[in-house]
Image (cartoon, rainbow, N blue to C red):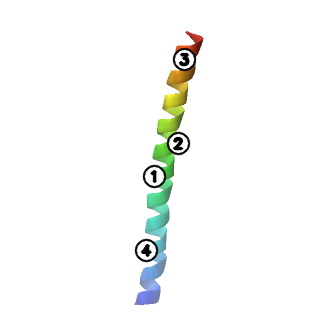
Amino acid sequence: MSTAERPSDNSGRILVLAGGLCGAAGVALSAAAAHLGGAFV
């Protein structure tokens, strides 16, 4: 049972990490876009 639960647990952690990275990247991109937009305008 433990060996069958580990893969799902690892995949869940990977999904959480991927979601966090995507969220952080989105925030960074939006902040950079706003900063560049303000600088160019």
The numbered mark, 1 or 4, whose residue comes first in the sequence reads 4
Q: Amino acid at mark 1?
A: Gly
Residue on which the image places disc 4: 9
The numbered mark, 3 or 2, whose residue comes first in the sequence reads 2
Q: Is residue 12 left or right of residue 35?
A: left
Dot 2 alpha-carbon crowd within 10 angstroms: few under 14, some 14 to 19, many 20 or more: few
Separation of disc 1 and disc 4 at Cα? 16 Å
In percent of width and height, residue 33 lies at 54, 25
Determine which of the numbered discs, if any, sits on residue 3 in the image: none
Vertical order, 19 against 7 (above or below): above
Separation of disc 3 and disc 4 at Cα? 41 Å
Q: Amino acid at mark 4?
A: Asp
User: If the image is split into quadrants, where does the C terminus sit?
Assistant: top right
The numbered mark, 4 or 2, whose residue comes first in the sequence reads 4
The numbered mark, 2 or 1, whose residue comes first in the sequence reads 1
Separation of disc 3 and disc 1 at Cα? 25 Å
Determine which of the numbered discs, if any, sits on residue 37 in the image: 3
Separation of disc 4 and disc 2 at Cα? 24 Å
Q: Secondary structure at mark 4?
A: helix
Residue on which the image places disc 1: 20
Vertical order, 38 against 7 (above or below): above
Q: Secondary structure at mark 3?
A: helix
Separation of disc 2 and disc 1 at Cα? 8 Å
Separation of disc 3 and disc 2 at Cα? 18 Å
Residue on which the image places disc 2: 25
In percent of width and height, residue 12 lies at 43, 67
Q: Is residue 1 left or right of residue 40?
A: left
